[in-house]
Image (tube, grey):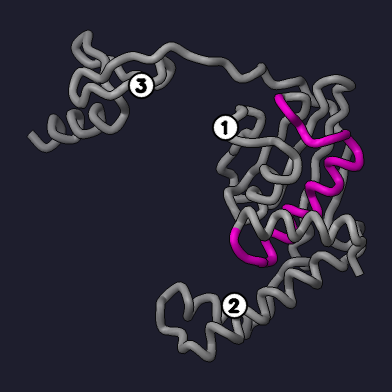
Amino acid sequence: MCSTNTGSMLETAIRFHGHQCPGLAIGTRVSEIALRELGKPAKDEEMFAIVENNSCGVDAIQVLTGCTFGKGNLIFNDFGKSVYTFMNRKNQKALRISIRKDAVQMNNEHLDLFARIKDKTATEAEIDIFSQMHIKKSNEIMDLPEKDLMIIKEIDLKPLPMARIHESMECTICGESVMETRVMLLGGAYHCIPCFEKLTETSVRK
């Protein structure tokens, strides 16, 4: 069984995320390791995280480790991998945590129900069964020994730059403020990305 502290962490993650699921359990277990090895949750940018997916587990990481998008100490690399990297800026200790596929793989019935729910063809009874299976799998992940769930490596990592506050520019088309690093120039005028894309799409059609 998972420890009382880990169970409490899961409860905190569920309150933030909205429901219990296997992905949230993974994020909770990963966060537990990061905090145990690297220190307390980040109040500012003392610790940063690099996540390689945008699954449910990232919500657990944000609420439990203090590495958040808003503070700029949570970096998202869209690689579609169950890999999480953390670094303590003070002692420059860094960990790379990868999840073992076999440890979190759902069985065929679970996967079939997941597909039915996504397609909106599941019955109420099937949705209930799926919810029970999701919670059961989540609890199994919480109870797995670390070595069976993940691979933890201490790595050398160059600290990422601290988050910067950038100036805002005004989009010529919509008039909304745009961070200067995201402004697109066209004909010497400033554009936000959506307006720039609309203009260039129109040009291509012509």
**Marks 2 and 3, how far apart at CA:** 42 Å
- The location of residue 123, given as percent across then percent down, is 46, 89
Q: Main secondary structure of the magenta part?
A: helix
Q: Residue furthest left?
A: 206
* Residue type, mark 3 in image: Val
Q: Earlier in the sequence, mark 1 or mark 3?
A: 1
Q: Which residue is mark 2?
A: 111
What segment carries the magenta color?
Answer: 18-44
The answer to if 150 sits in the magenta stretch is no
Three-letter code for the amino acid on which mark 1 is drawn? Gly
Question: Secondary structure under badge 1?
Answer: loop
Residue labelled with disc 1: 70
For label 1, the crowd category at 10 Å Cα-Cα, with few meaning under 14, some 14 to 19 and many 20 or more, is few
Residue at image position (91%, 58%) is: 147
Q: Nearer the viewer, residue 173 or 115?
A: 173
Residue neighbourhood size for the residue with mark 3, other residues' Cα within 10 Å, grouped as few (<14), some (14–19), many (≥20): some
**What is the secondary structure assignment of the residue under circle 2?**
helix
Mark nearer the N terminus (1 vs 2): 1
Report which residue position mark 3 lands on.
Answer: 178
Amino acid type for the residue under numbered disc 2: Leu
